[in-house]
Image (cartoon, helix red, strand yellow):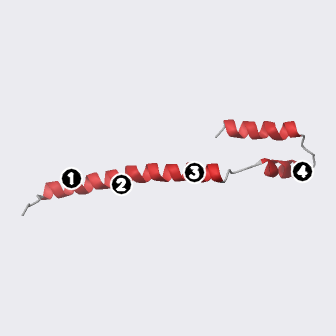
Amino acid sequence: MMEIQVWQLVLYIILGIIGGAIAGFFGARAFFKYQLKKNPPINEKMIRAMFMSMGRKPSEAQVRAVMNSMSKNQ
């Protein structure tokens, strides 16, 4: 039977933790990007409601300009 030394066990544990952290980071990042694409944080309807709450009726050009500026800053 194969015997493992203490330093090898510590090395395997450290490598496992580092590998798990890297895999977890990329997995969480991919999931977060997917959720943002599926459920964008703001849409045209919300922008129109924001303009209406400020007491003005937005034109379609204003709504598009706000959407374009928000998509450029993501």
Identify the mark at residue 11; answer none if there is no mark.
1
Mark found first going from the N terminus, 4 or 1 = 1
Q: Amino acid at mark 2?
A: Gly
Indicate which label's residue lies in the foreground, 1 or 2. 2
Indicate which label's residue lies in the foreground, 2 or 4. 2
Q: Amino acid at mark 4?
A: Met
Label 4 crowd (10 A; few <14 / some 14-19 / many >=20): few
Name the residue located 73 percent from the left edge and 50 percent from the top edge: 42
Determine the secondary structure under disc 2: helix
Quadrant the N terminus occupies: bottom left
Residue 26: x and y, percent? 45, 48
Per the image, the residue denoted by label 3 is 34
Q: CA distance from mark 2 to mark 4?
A: 48 Å
Name the residue located 38 percent from the left edge and 49 percent from the top edge: 22
Indicate which label's residue lies in the foreground, 2 or 3. 3
Location of residue 14 by image quarter: bottom left
Mark found first going from the N terminus, 3 or 1 = 1
Mark found first going from the N terminus, 2 or 3 = 2
Residue 61: x and y, percent? 86, 36
